[in-house]
Image: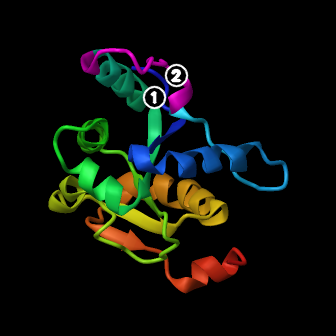
Amino acid sequence: MSYRNKTYVAFASEDIRSYWLMEAWRENVHIDFNFFDAHDLYVARDTSKPESIKARLRERMKNAKQFVLLGSRSAKAKGGDGRSFLAYEVQTMLSLDLPVVVANLDQDRNVDRSFIPTPLLDADYYTLSVSFQPAIIKYALDNYAPQYAASGKTGPHFYNESHYKKLGL
């Protein structure tokens, strides 16, 4: 098994601009945000067959130690439709049993069940919902993710306002 040190960012294709923004945060020297992106590994061309794309996605995900799901209505719909690549990613997330941070693209700081794909909700999977801001996403990846396995918690969770205030948000 490969060494897991990456963050896998999953999103609906409609939300790709938010993913690009995360990459820009990472490159900006004035923003304290960094992640080792699993998307940098095993690149699949858009013209690849669905089976080969899924194989590449699984290889990327096997190198991940944590996941960020860009939460939106599109992510909920596609992540639970059983056909899309995001649905495949959600099923693989479940099978790998790794921490999932749901970054709500509407800036909501609470659990928004209309943004979380149904398979994660049906499995009562332990997720942490945060607003789509670099400081709180970084905080969640640094704090929630390492404690995930030992927590024994289930279902969707969120940080209370004190966490945001501590980060100046």
Estimate how packed mark 2 is, as few (under 14), some (14 to 19) or many (20 or more) residues with alpha carbons within 10 Å. some
On the image, which quarter does residue 73 sit in? bottom left
Q: Residue at x 70, y 52 (%)?
A: 33
Residues at marks 1 and 2, CA–CA distance in whole angstroms: 9 Å
**Percent x, y for residue 166?**
68, 79
Query: Is residue 11 at all visible to an observer of this figure?
Result: no
Nearer-N-terminus badge (1/2):
2
What colour scheme was applied to this rendering of the protein?
Answer: rainbow
Identified by mark 2, the residue type is: Leu
Query: Which residue position holds label 1?
Result: 63
Q: Quadrant of the C terminus?
A: bottom right
Identified by mark 1, the residue type is: Asn
User: Which residues, given as a range, are shown in magenta?
Assistant: 39-51
Q: Quadrant of the N terminus?
A: top left
**Percent x, y for residue 131?**
53, 69
Query: Which residue position holds label 2?
Result: 41
Left or right of 42? Residue 142 is right
Query: Is residue 13 at all visible to an observer of this figure?
Result: yes
**Percent x, y for residue 47?**
39, 16
Q: Is residue 83 magenta?
A: no
Q: Is residue 50 magenta?
A: yes
Secondary structure of the residue carrying tag 2 is loop
Q: Nearer the viewer, residue 30 or 147?
A: 30
**Percent x, y for residue 51?**
25, 18
Estimate how packed mark 1 is, as few (under 14), some (14 to 19) or many (20 or more) residues with alpha carbons within 10 Å. many
Secondary structure of the magenta portion, mostly?
loop
On the image, which quarter does residue 94 sit in? top left
Left or right of 66? Residue 141 is right
Left or right of 138? Residue 115 is left
Vertical relation: 164 (above or below) 117: below
